[in-house]
Image: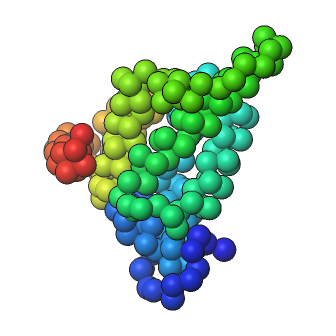
Amino acid sequence: MSPGNKRPRTLFGNPDVAWSDARLVGACLDGNEQAWATLIAKYKNLIYSIPLKYGAPPQDAADIFQSVCLELFTELPRLRRAEAVRSWIIKVTSHQSYHWKRKLRRLAEDELTPIDEAEVSSALPPDVMEEVERAQILREAVAALPRRCQEIIRLLFYEPEPIAYRDLAARLGLATGSIGFIRGRCLQRLERALHELGF
């Protein structure tokens, strides 16, 4: 069941992570189950990255992820501006991560102190929060590229070990001499996409 099933379902096509937030949220609210899965896929790395910045181990980060997804599911119909979903996710995930850290500290110190809500917004330094948001913008820009460009950028820049052009060409079924040109075109497209997203 998707959030807000009151409106009649409309045909949105197959949702994709390159869709705008407003379009994805609209599809979710119209009962499109695939749009819900796509919205979560679009933001899963962002949601996971925040508790990890707080020092949460993978299991606790997964718990926070589930909790944020549940809150998103519940609150999505009440979101005033669909295009603000990324900011909402960052705020909610930071809040939950902060409370996880406070709870852990309390258990370690074996004392109960009142939570200072003013500290929640400043739990992570602003530059770290900006880094988290910029990483999400980069993920969205890469997702907006054609599939071949996404694959080239992933293999060249996201793999732990560098890949030689001849190996990249073999994996993609391209001539080795064409990789440099295609890489340049893909990076230009990525630069344009980043600019459009305000990076």
Instruction: From the viewer's perspective, tell me whether residue 119 is left or right of residue 111.
Output: left
- Quarter occupied by residue 99: top right
Instruction: From the viewer's perspective, tell me whether residue 171 is left or right of residue 3.
Output: left
Question: Can I make out residue 173 in this image?
Answer: no
Q: Residue at x 66, y 35 (%)?
A: 61
Q: Residue at x 41, y 30 (%)?
A: 129
Question: Can I make out residue 176 in this image?
Answer: yes
- Quarter occupied by residue 166: top left
Instruction: From the viewer's perspective, tell me whether residue 172 is left or right of residue 75.
Output: left
- Quarter occupied by residue 36: bottom right
Work out whether residue 11 or residue 100 is closer to the camera in this orientation and state it. Answer: 100
Q: How many marks?
A: 0
Place of residue 40 in the rendered image (x, y in percent of width and height, measured from the top left): 54, 56
Place of residue 121 in the rendered image (x, y in percent of width and height, measured from the top left): 48, 30
Which quarter of the rendering shows the N terminus? bottom right
Q: Residue at x 51, y 64 (%)?
A: 78
Q: In the image as oriented, which residue stretches furthest toward the top? A: 109
Q: Please, which colouring scheme is shown?
A: rainbow
Which quarter of the rendering shows the C terminus? top left
Q: Residue at x 50, y 79 (%)?
A: 30
Work out whether residue 182 or residue 82 is closer to the camera in this orientation and state it. Answer: 82
User: From the viewer's perspective, is residue 166 above or below residue 98?
Assistant: below
Work out whether residue 82 or residue 14 is closer to the camera in this orientation and state it. Answer: 82
User: From the viewer's perspective, is residue 111 above or below residue 81?
Assistant: above
Place of residue 178 in the rendered image (x, y in percent of width and height, measured from the top left): 20, 46
